[in-house]
Amino acid sequence: MNKIWFLPLILLIMLAGCTPRRFSLLPRASLLILSHHLEKGVGEDTVQITGVARNNSAAELQYAEVIGKFYDKAGTLLHSGVDSTINLSPGQTWEFTISVGVHPALNILSYYLKKDSSGARIIGEAENNGDVMLSFAEITGTFYCTAGELASGTATTLRLGVGEIWEFTIFYPRSNYEIVSSVRAEVNEDELDCEPIEGVDDTTVQVGALRGSTVMP
C-alpha cells in the first residue's frame, strides 16, 4: 500500500524538476507598435510623432508607454519624448502622440579638484538630462581657499546630445594655485541653448515601461 502512494510522489518530484525555472502560467505584458509617422507644422515650431499601438497580450496593461526620438539628417539625436496610457485591455489599440518638449537641462554628475605641476583645475562630468540637444552649454567653476573665494573660470561645449555625458575641465586662472583648497561647479542655466525644432528629419519609436495584470475569465 505504501508503494502505491510512493510512486505518484516520485512522479510529481520528477515533473517539478523538469519544469523550466522561468516558466510561468501567467500571461506576459506586451505592446505592439502598429504604425507611426512624423508630423511637422502642427503648431508654431512644433513637430510630433503620432502612431497606433496595440495590447498584444492576454494581460490588461495597467500602464504602458512609448518612447519617441527625433533625429536630424545626419542621424544625430535632437529630442526625445514619452507618451503613456493606463488600463489598456487585451487587443485594445491606443493612438499615441509624442511632441517635442524642448526642455533644455544639464546635470553635473561629479567633479573634483586636481593639483599638480601644471596647475589647479576642476575635472568633472555633466549629463544632458533634458529632452533636447544642447547647441551650447556652460559650467562655472569657483576656486576657494580657507579665507574665501579666489577666482572663477568656465567650461563650454557645443552640440551635446540627449543623454550624452560631457567630461569638462575648468582651469584655475592664476599662478598661485597651491593655496586652492576646495572648488565648486554649477550649471549656468542662462547659457543653455538648444537645437531648433525645424532640424528634425527622422524619428524612431520603442516600447517603454509596461505594467500588466492577468485578466480573469
Image: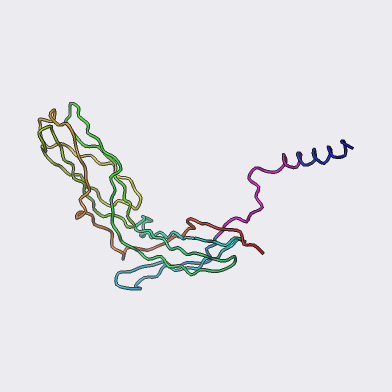
Residue at (21, 49) in percent of width and height: 138
Residue 129 rendering spot, x and y as whole percentages = 33, 51
- The one nearer the camera, 161 or 29, is 29
Residue at the limit of the structure toward the right, as seen here:
1
Q: Quadrant of the N terminus?
A: top right
- The one nearer the camera, 30 or 169, is 30
- Magenta stretch holds residue 194: no
Query: Number of numbered discs present?
Result: 0
Residue at the limit of the structure toward the top, as seen here:
117
Q: Main secondary structure of the magenta part?
A: loop
Residue at (37, 66) in percent of width and height: 99
Q: Is 210 on the left-hand or right-hand side of 104? A: right
Using the image, determine if residue 78 lies above or below residue 166.
below
Residue 209 rendering spot, x and y as whole percentages = 48, 55
Using the image, determine if residue 171 lies above or below residue 42.
above
Would you identify the image quadrant in which residue 93 lies? bottom right
Would you identify the image quadrant in which residue 183 lies? top left
Residue 27 rendering spot, x and y as whole percentages = 62, 56
Magenta highlight range: 14-30
Colouring method of the image: rainbow
Q: Quadrant of the C terminus?
A: bottom right
- Magenta stretch holds residue 25: yes
Residue at (28, 57) in percent of width and height: 104
Residue 108 rendering spot, x and y as whole percentages = 28, 45
Q: Is 146 on the left-hand or right-hand side of 204? A: left
Using the image, determine if residue 107 lies above or below residue 2.
below
